[in-house]
Image (tube, rainbow, N blue to C red):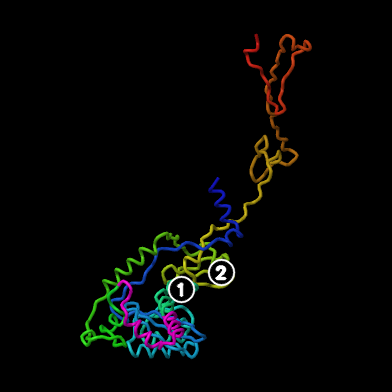
């Protein structure tokens, strides 16, 4: 009974459209780079009606920020070139889609020999490194503006402060040295020292995965042709999986004549809606087999020669006569006790004395 209810609800379009969000899947972390500035994360931040390009290193967490004149691809490429001229060309840059997925940015990545990896639309968690950097930089600049302090000094001190849970700062992991700031320091502390931060990064990564993976759930893998519902706004809309995308947990689906790329968490697998079953005619005498066989299936008997089917009437149980006792006897004829449902009433043998 429970399976029937679940199956019926899963085929209800209204119930499916109003389903809540799916649970989180286990954290799929990025691999720790082997060296600084090998893999970057980039995003565009808006603060006080101004747009900024925020770039951070996956290894050192060192942030770079640039004020954008506009959010066009050419403006973003110009500032990326400026940042890469200072620190070098990375091997990979993880971004969201707009405007990094434009033809100009793809051509820039090809000509400068690095790979541009875009996250699934509406799923910024896959570019979490950039999202965390944007949140931190936005808080930093907001506090500096409210307190009337120099935002560049605030940015310098952030780059020079050890990362939570580690003994190294972003500047130490990227440049192998501390940066001289307004805080008192010694000449010995400013001497370059090559550091190897990968063990500490691995420990921090394990801690993050442990706390994130509490209460998560694995979602089944989808295949081409699977019937799904895609999350669009607050409702689930019907769609069909076209193919898995080259990125993990990402799929290309078709809905309403349009192709979408979505993360697995935004796809709700639903059962295939089978074609309606032909209506079964009510079984009556015309549907019964004839009493005699026809000479050949291709040459049936004329309708007039087919004998009428005979159906034996169901046998009714013989009635049980009950003889009334003594003073209860009204006449000499025995009385037949029959219930309204058709069942016969029979008095127990102990009364037949």
Of the 4 image quadrants, the one containing the N terminus is top right
Residue 216 x/y as whole percent: 42, 60
Residue 304 placement: quadrant: top right
Which one is earlier in the sequence, the residue at label 2 or at label 1? Answer: 1
| Front disc: 2 or 1 | 1
- Mark 1 neighbour class, 10 Å CA radius: few under 14, some 14 to 19, many 20 or more: some
Residue 33 x/y as whole percent: 31, 76
Q: Which mark is residue 232?
A: 2
Q: Secondary structure at mark 2?
A: strand
Residue beneath disc 1: 124
Q: Secondary structure at mark 1?
A: helix
- Say above or below: 299 vs 148: above
Q: Could you tell whether 323 is left or right of 177 in the image?
A: right
- Mark 2 neighbour class, 10 Å CA radius: few under 14, some 14 to 19, many 20 or more: few
Which residue is most to the right?
A: 331
- Going 70% across and 29% down the picture, which residue do you hit? 341
Magenta stretch: includes residue 140: yes
Q: Could you tell whether 59 is left or right of 328 in the image?
A: left
């Amino acid at each position: 009974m429970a399976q029937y209810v679940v199956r019926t609800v899963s085929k209800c379009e209204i119930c499916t459209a109003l389903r809540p969000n799916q649970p989180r899947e286990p954290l799929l972390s990025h691999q720790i780079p082997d060296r600084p500035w090998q893999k970057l994360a980039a995003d565009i931040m808006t603060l006080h009606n101004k747009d900024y390009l925020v770039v951070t290193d996956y290894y050192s967490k060192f942030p770079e920020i640039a004020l954008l004149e506009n959010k066009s691809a050419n403006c973003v490429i110009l500032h990326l070139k400026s940042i890469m001229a200072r620190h070098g060309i990375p091997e990979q840059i993880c971004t969201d889609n707009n405007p990094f997925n434009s033809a100009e940015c793809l051509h820039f990545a090809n000509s400068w020999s690095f790979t541009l990896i875009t996250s699934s639309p509406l799923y910024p968690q896959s570019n979490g490194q950039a999202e965390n950097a944007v949140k931190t930089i936005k808080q930093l600049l907001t506090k500096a503006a409210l307190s009337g302090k120099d935002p560049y000094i605030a940015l310098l001190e952030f780059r020079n402060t050890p990362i939570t849970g580690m003994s190294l700062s972003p500047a130490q992991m990227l440049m192998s040295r501390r940066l001289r700031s307004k805080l008192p320091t010694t000449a010995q502390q400013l001497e370059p020292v090559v550091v190897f931060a990968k063990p500490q990064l691995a420990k921090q990564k394990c801690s993050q995965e442990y706390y994130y993976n509490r209460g998560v759930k694995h979602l089944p893998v989808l295949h081409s042709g699977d019937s799904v519902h895609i999350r669009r706004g607050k409702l689930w809309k019907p769609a069909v999986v076209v193919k898995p995308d080259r990125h993990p947990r990402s799929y290309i689906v078709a809905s309403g004549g349009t192709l979408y790329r979505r993360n697995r968490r935004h796809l709700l697998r639903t059962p295939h809606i089978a074609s309606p079953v032909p209506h079964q005619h009510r079984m009556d005498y015309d549907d019964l087999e004839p009493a005699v066989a026809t000479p050949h299936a291709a040459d049936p008997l004329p309708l007039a020669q087919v004998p009428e089917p005979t159906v034996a009437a169901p046998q009714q149980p013989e009635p049980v006569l009950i003889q009334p006792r003594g003073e209860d006897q009204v006449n000499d004829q025995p009385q037949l006790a029959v219930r309204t449902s058709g069942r016969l009433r029979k008095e127990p043998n102990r009364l037949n004395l």
